[in-house]
Image (cartoon, rainbow, N blue to C red):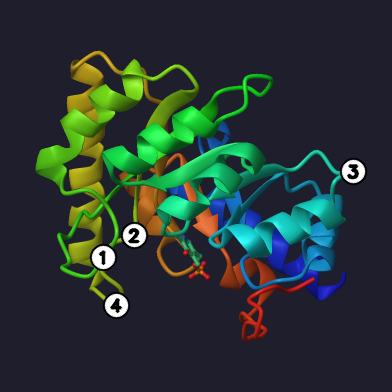
Amino acid sequence: MNPVEQRFNAVGTRIDEACSAAARERAKVRLLAVSKQHSAEAIRALHALGQVAFGENRAQEAIGKMAALSELPIEWHFIGPIQSNKTRDIARHFDWVQSVDRAKILRKLDAYRPDGLAPLQLCLQVNIDQEPQKAGINPEQLAELAALAQSLERVRLRGLMCIPTAGADAQATATSFQRMVALQEMLKEQGHCLDTLSMGMSGDLELAVMEGSTMVRVGTDLFGPRPPRTQAGTQL
Ligand SMILES: *Cc1c(COP(=O)(O)O)cnc(C)c1O
C-alpha cells in the first residue's frame, strides 16, 4: 500500500470506530478531504481511492485545481474566509460553501449563483467559542442569518460548521460541539430542514463524531503536513 492509501484507510478506520463507539450509523458521517495547499495530483490520487468531497479555503488556488481536474466528478466545498470580491468566483465554481457568516456575503453568493447550476449548498459558520479574531457568526445572531438564507432562491441551507478553539482540552471541545448540536436543534424547531453538522478535524474527529458531527473535515491526517504556499498562493 502506498502512503496515500494508508492514510486514507487509517482515517476511514478512525471514522468507522468512532461511529461504533457512539452507536451511530456509519453512513451518517461524511468525510471532507481538506486539500488546501496540496496539489491537484494529490487530489487525483485520493479521488482514485473513492474520495469525492474536497475542501479548499482560497478561491484562486482552488479554481486552478478545478481546471486541472475538470474531468473528475468532484464535489467542491469552500471552507475559508470569504472576501466580498471573491463571492462571484465562489458562487460559480463551488458546490458547497461552509463558511458563510454574514448577510452581505450570503446575498452576494445567492445573486451570483448561475441559474443553470443546482442551488449552492450552505453551512453557516458559527464562532462557537466567541473568539474575538475568529470568523463565524455569533450564536445570538444565527437565527436571523438562517432566516435570510431560507428566503433566498439560489442557495440551500444544509446546516452549521464550526472550528472550536485550537488547543482546548477535550472536555471544552466536547462542550463546544454540544452547543453546536443545540443551535442546530433550535434552527430545526424554527422550521429549517437541516442535515449537516460540519465539525471535527484531524485532531478531534472522534470527539466530533461522538457529539453528533455529520461531516468531518480532515487535511493533515489524509495528505500529510501542508507544504508552504507558493508566492502566488497557487499550487498545481
Ligand atoms: C485546514 C482546515 C481543516 C483541516 O485541518 P487539519 O487539522 O489539517 O485536519 C478543517 N477545517 C477548516 C475550516 C480548515 O481550514
Q: Residue at x 76, y 52 (%)?
A: 66
Pointer 2 or 3: first along the chain: 3
Q: Residue at x 24, y 33 (%)?
A: 145
Image marks 3 and 1: residues in contact by CB distance under 8 Å: no
- Residue 196 vs residue 221: left or right? left
Nearer to us in this view, 46 or 233: 233
Q: Residue at x 56, y 30 (%)?
A: 113
Q: Which residue is mark 3?
A: 71
Q: Residue at x 55, y 51 (%)?
A: 15
Return the mark for residue 167: 4
* Circle 3: residue type: Glu
Q: Which residue is mark 2?
A: 163
**Label 4, ligand 1: CB separation under 8 Å:** no
Return the mark for residue 134: 1
Where is the C terminus found, in terms of image quarters?
Answer: bottom right
**Label 1, ligand 1: CB separation under 8 Å:** no
- Residue 145 vs residue 111: left or right? left
Label 2, label 3: how far apart the Cα atoms are = 32 Å
Q: Which mark is nearer the camera, 4 or 1?
A: 1
**Label 2, ligand 1: CB separation under 8 Å:** yes
Image marks 1 and 2: residues in contact by CB distance under 8 Å: yes
Point out residue 206 in the picture as x, y percentages from the top left corner: 43, 57
* Circle 1: residue type: Lys
